[in-house]
Amino acid sequence: MRYFIELSYNGEKYHGWQNQPNAISVQEVIEKALSILLRSNIAIVGAGRTDAGVHAKQMYAHFDTDVVFNRAELTFKLNSFLPKDVAIQQIHTVKEDAHARFDATGRTYEYWIVSEKNPFYTQSAHTVYKKLDVDLMNKAAKKLFNYQDFKCFSKTHTDVKTYICQLEKAVWEQKGELLVFTIRADRFLRNMVRAIVGTLLEVGLGKLSIEGFKEIIASRDRNKAGTSVPGKALYLTAVTYPAETFTTHG
């Protein structure tokens, strides 16, 4: 049978989601725990591939097994077995051909920024000491909806067949001490959110005009976009699927 794992993790100590030959990944620690507890070799497929240091408040991954188990008991055992920075919320039963990555219809990310030194956000937010024009950054963010090809924000030399993404949301909001950028789309390219944020920060700092921002997107040239901001302040906050994907939710 196929199952979906719903999980969250603090990515600070991991070299991203995906298995790496010489570095620890979130996928690796979950696969090891599942394989030990189910006493069989378990491979999992994630809904996405977060980069090194990036966190997930909600992530899904699927795995197949013939082993019969109680989902609540396995969730409890996994959480006892896994490191403190990885948590399993639930194991769902799904239709047999459900795919954690390809069936996802939407993904939402947040990027956190603070404006002054804050010991509580040293490892979880990006500090920008200079004053930002948030209104101008929001005006620029709205221009993203005029485009579907985001090659200029994609990591170069990736194996993607298309750079087309359907954006649903892109907005900056002040939430207490945090300036939060929320962006939602059907899919994202490698490094895309961090590159968008880095380029929008140039707008907010007065280094780039809105017209210049539009020209960068139209150019499809990664070298013209801004520097990618650090991964430590990026959070995958939601992954959505069609309701029929899940056969039970309990």
Image: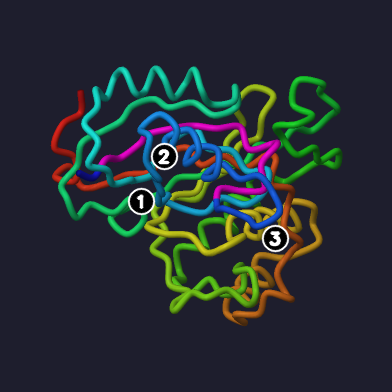
Q: Are marks 1 and 3 in contact (CB under 8 Å)?
A: no
Q: Secondary structure at mark 1?
A: strand
> Picture coordinates of residue 17 (x, y %)?
56, 48
Q: Specify how the rendered protein is coloured.
A: rainbow
> Earlier along the polypeptide chain: callout 1 or callout 3?
1
Which residues fall within the magenta stretch? 3-17
Q: Are marks 1 and 2 in contact (CB under 8 Å)?
A: yes
Describe residue 7's horizontal placement relative to residue 204 as left or right. Answer: left
> Picture coordinates of residue 63 (x, y %)?
33, 45
Residue at the image position 44 percent from the left and 50 percent from the top: 184
Q: Amino acid at mark 2?
A: Ala
Q: Amino acid at mark 1?
A: Gly
Q: CA gap, disc 3 to disc 2?
A: 23 Å
Quarter of the rendering occupied by the C terminus? top left
- Residue 8 included in the magenta stretch of the image: yes
**Which residue is identified by label 3?**
199
Front residue of this view, candidates 69 and 63: 69
